[in-house]
Image (cartoon, helix red, strand yellow):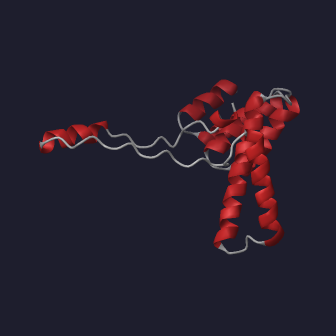
Amino acid sequence: MLAQAGSASGTGQKEQAVTLWKQAAVAYPTDKSPWLSIAQTRYEAGQYGDAIINAQEVLVRDPNDTLANSIIAISGLRLSTRSLADLSRQNNLSGSIRTESQDLAKLLRESLGESVLVPPAPAPTPAAAPARGKVAAKKAGGKAKAADSSADPFDALK
């Protein structure tokens, strides 16, 4: 079942893979791997609430699983950030909610040993002086890379 689920996931059939992982979890209730695969799949899909629930199933089976704890921490932060942004846009981030959010941000900064919770983006490096002609422009365009948005979200927790 795990091999079939992995195969389905690899071909982009994520929901079929999740169904197979759930079947494997029922068949082998002490195995954490189906739950971890579901948690990772849900995280990658931006379904952070589901990712947390499935990562908690991993922790029931292995309380020291670092990846499951990371999924819970990062997913929780992403949900919190989204909710705080929504409240801020609605001008409802005030009073005790604002104070508690600031206290939590301070606790996170201290836990991570950082002076700021989210460091500013690095300054763009100055571009090289443009070369003459269209050929040089084509070469420069071919070398340009888009920012990698698929960076491992758990790197900061290692």
Observer able to see residue 22: no
Q: Residue furthest bottom?
A: 91
Residue 16: horizontal and vertical position, in percent? 63, 40
The quarter of the rendered structure image containing the N terminus is top right
- The answer to whether residue 137 is left or right of residue 15 is left
Q: Position of residue 40 (x, y in %)?
A: 67, 37
Which residue is depicted at the point 37% across and 40% down?
145
- At 48% from the left edge and 40% from the top edge, which residue is drawn? 148
Asked whether, in this view, residue 129 is left or right of residue 116, the answer is: left
Closest to the observer, 15 or 113: 113
Instruction: Give the quadrant of residue 42.
Output: top right
Quadrant of the rendered image containing residue 65: top right
From where the camera sits, is residue 81 visible? Answer: yes
What residue appears at the point 66 percent right and 43 percent down from the top-left corner?
Answer: 43
Residue placed furthest toward the front: 115
Percent from the top left, x then y, of residue 92?
A: 73, 74
Q: Is residue 13 left or right of residue 113?
A: left
Which residue is farthest top? 3
